[in-house]
Image (cartoon, helix red, strand yellow):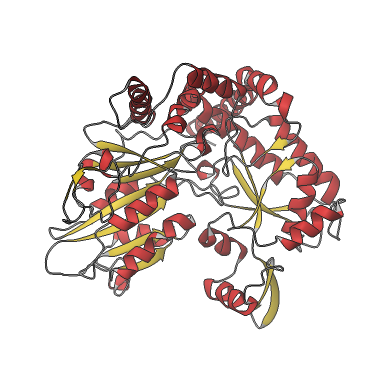
Amino acid sequence: MSLQYVALFVSLFVSLFLEHVDCLEIVCNATFSKVYNDEIAPRFLGHYMDFTGSSIFLNRQVNQSSQILESGVFGNPHSKSSSSKLSTSYVEEMRAKIYEFFSASPEEYEVVFTRSATGALHLLGEAFPFSSRGSNYAYLVSNHNSVLGIRSFAEKRGARIGAVTEEMVDAWLKSPNDPAWKGSVFEARDNDGQSYSLFAYPKKDNYEGVLYPDRWIEEVKNMSTANHEWMVLLDTAAYAPTYRLNLTEIHPDFVVISFYKVFGLPTGVGAWLMRKESETKLRRTYWGGSSVFTATSALPWEIRFQDAAKWEDGTLPFLDIANLKPGFDTMEYLGGIDSVQRYVTCLGRYMSEQLQSLKHSNGNPMLLLYGKHYDDPSRQSGIANFQILKPSGELFSYRTAALVLSEQGFQVRDGCMCNPGACYKAVGVTDEEVRDKAIRAEGNYKNWEWIYVMRDGELVKRPLGSIRVSLGWMSRQADIDALVDFLSETYRDVEEDPQPSNKESRSATEADAFIRC
């Protein structure tokens, strides 16, 4: 072996070792541990591991919220009174905070308050200029249901719709004129007049936790022609709570977020960031109180606002918006989003390694992990979505396992997590097979856990969901260790499903088996 290769090997080993040591230090971060022990542990003895479902708030947020509410009288912002001005001041301060949080320029982006990321997606779908004259709605298979829902607007207006895989996107961007795209959402179609298409993808999918590339944004927009424009929707609901999104470095046309997923409190507040240039292409139909300057009753006439207020119908939830301030302040106390990102990223690596280490006595793995844990960990976030395996390789019941975990204080999610594309691809069933099973069920979804499908001439049993563990700003190494220990003690070398001890909770789960998504 030449000295050059020896030096390269040593350099790689040292860098990986230092990265590992650095991660160990970050995982043991005293600030995060102290905050948890002081503010979460006194009111919660379990292991919260569903941060992608919702973050959890700290006591300091509640205390600061009380101080804000006790500081004065808050009135409807649509007035010139002192109480109205107080509410307005908080609304605009938080709007400015959102610009800062995303490093977005007020000259380039508009920040619109919504009830959630889903609320923002509804507004976008309603207003996007889909048409039968060459419009397409292409969305990554691994999108949340709320993103899929936009296709109802697109299809109604005659646009071509289609779910696409990561491989399809990269192939299209490399060879956009390939005949293989004929008849698909990527087909370049001539049309009379201007037309618009929308490409939607999550920066991080909420099922497997896979991270998707920034480069798609500009590459997709570069597919535009003189009379056809591609725009990009970036769903950051799962990404923004633990990663920095810098909108001076990337420029998606539309970004959506829910703040309860970032801070835990308040619920019912989201934001829609849209490029002002892209906003001019949208065609809003509905208007309501506060989104118009003036209107007449008998005469169908109104003057609509042209800034963020154009989209903010009715009175904003001004008290909830004010209570974003404790969340932003807490994030800064923890060292900012970059500190949270380093912490959760290292915890995620540790979790992945520990879960992969679980083995039965015969050497077979105890878990099947979905996502990029095995082949590309650099694109795997702090989510572990998995099936629990028997020594024979068969699957345990994920629904029963979720109930057993819950009884032991583990707050996890089971099912498809409102991401059918990623879910059904992972478990190995087709959309048509799921559709046909749902039709046969005729509204009775009590036994919605398994499906029998033909594979290679044989009837095989496949799950219709899985178990998800997701990390966030108040996750701990102790939670991961406890989960690994419990899985090892409960499922190692076991062939029959461990059952929950509480019969009442078991029967309640069976009665309410078809939880949303």
Q: Which corner quadrant holds the N terminus?
A: top right
**Residue nearest the observer in this picture, 308 or 105:** 308
Q: Position of residue 158 (x, y in %)?
A: 28, 71
Viewer-proximal residue, 99 or 376? 99
Q: Residue at x 34, y 69 (%)?
A: 155
Compared to residue 188, the image places residue 121 above or below, namely: above
Does 291 sit left or right of 76 as displayed?
left
Residue 115: where, in percent of width, then height? 43, 43
* 376 left or right of 127 in image: right
What x and y, as percent, mark residue 211?
47, 45
User: Does residue 25 sit above or below 251 in this rendering?
Assistant: above
Is residue 159 at least partly visible in the picture?
yes
Q: Is residue 389 visible?
A: no
Residue 31 vertical placement versus 173 (above, below): above
Which residue occupies the foreground of this view, 187 or 409? 409
- The residue most toward the bottom is 457
Look at the picture and state if 314 lies above or below 465: above
Query: Could you say where residue 495 lies in the image, as x and y percent from the top left?
Result: 86, 60
Q: Quadrant of the C terminus?
A: bottom right
Q: Residue furthest front?
A: 298
